[in-house]
Amino acid sequence: MSQAELSQRELAWMVLRGEMPPRLPFITRLEAWHRSHQRTQSLPPHLADWDLDRLHHEVGVGRLKFVNAYAFRLRGVEVHARFEGETIYHEYEPVIENFPSFWDIISTTNPGTTETDLIAPEGTLHLRHGLLPEHVQSGLDPYLQKHLISQAEDYPVAEAVIERMEFVPLFESVQAWQDQIGGHGMVVPLLQRIPFQQLLLEYLGEINLFKALHYERNRVERLLQLLDEQLLDVLPRLEPLGAGSPEGTPYVEFPDNLHGMMTSPPLFRKYCLESYQKYTEILHGQGKKVGSHTDGDMRTLLSLLPESGLDVCESFSQQPLTSCPFEEAWQAFRNGPLIWGAIPSTWLEEQTPQEVFEKEIETLLDLIDRPILLGVVDLFMRHNSIERVVYIAQRLRERQPPLSSDQVRREEAPF
């Protein structure tokens, strides 16, 4: 099969197997850009009738689609959500894909506030999400204003809810999405975040978690233990995931949103490293590759991530989005994990001159001597240039196949 005939999906599988592909895969998310311009009726005329799949195909970049691999049924829990005081969701023992953030039931199209109550026999937990008009226009999701745990009395309620949650597989949904996207993209089945990241981003929030680690460490570590036990129960159940496709599902991901400033090296060593090692061992035993969404500043974690067992750092963000130069990560990850991302969205803004953008792309491509998945990080937004995505896709088709470091050494040998 010629280079031109290989799909983005096939190129990605080569990279995930550790093979140098004939051209570098370029797989990313254009949905925020597309959704924003649809909502404001500002799509260029020739794109106005294109859906997201056609946009990816015509532009020449593979589509990255995250799909939840499973959900949870909340046994013994009544969920009542109100948007601006009006009930939008009310169900007993619902099946929720995104627990505890509840993105399933939160409005993403109308600005305002959504209040959600989780009513359990042990007590009631409360969430609040906000969505501003500019978030709607930009195609962004609501932000969490009040986390699930905000006082000491919430811990035992949250523990009881977690202990009764029941696993609900969504494997057919994952396969349906891959069938829809086909070879021109990658569907990534999402797991839940690892326990520490769940507490940091979902259950307590950053400030409250850091306070709790000082004043309520026993409560925090009990919650971490419960979430660890939950994941150790869930992961073996993923064995059938991907069994219906010819290659199986080679890659799953923790949506951890790692950031070295929030999850600092000491916290990573204490609460994350062993967790990753345990979870990746289970998933590797199923023949799966495992990644984490690492869209924050990874510079302080570069020496630790290779010990984690992770195969991929997805949405890796280099300078100027973070303090981390690409070269440092490229050297630190020489024996893994793979990088997916590496193209900062700031390069695709009009304020970056075209000649600077082109030079940055060429410099990046010249450094690549082993497998990598390219993508725009963290999101391709409304103010980014779709023409520059086309440029990158075209340059990847035009460039000679990248040489591996072994090939470079052979070419440089005197005889």
Image: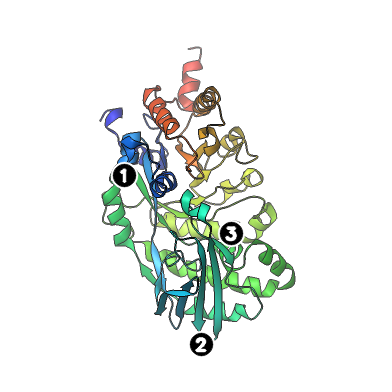
Q: Nearer the viewer, residue 345 or 74?
A: 345
Q: Earlier in the sequence, mark 3 or mark 2?
A: 2
The answer to whether marks 3 and 2 mark residues whose Cβ atoms lie closer than 8 Å is: no
- Image position, residue 414 (x, y; %): 51, 12
What distance separates the C-alpha of mark 1 from that of mark 2?
45 Å
Question: Residue 274: where, in percent of width, then height?
Answer: 58, 59
What secondary structure is found at the residue carrying circle 1?
helix
Q: CA distance from mark 3 to mark 2?
A: 34 Å
Q: Residue at (50%, 21%) from the top-left corner?
A: 409
User: Which label sits on residue 53?
Assistant: 1
Say which amino acid is labelled 1.
Asp
Which quadrant does the N terminus fall into? top left
Measured in 3D between alpha carbons, the distance from the residue under mark 1 to the one under mark 3, in whole angstroms, is: 39 Å
Q: Look at 38% across and 22% down and name the residue there.
A: 398
* Image x and y of residue 403, in percent: 44, 25
Using the rendered image of the protein, determine whether residue 242 is visible from the camera's viewpoint: no
Three-letter code for the amino acid on which mark 2 is drawn: Pro
| Label ID, residue 121 | 2
Can residue 219 be seen here? The reply is yes
Q: Which residue is mark 3?
A: 274
Q: Secondary structure at mark 2?
A: loop
Q: Earlier in the sequence, mark 1 or mark 2?
A: 1
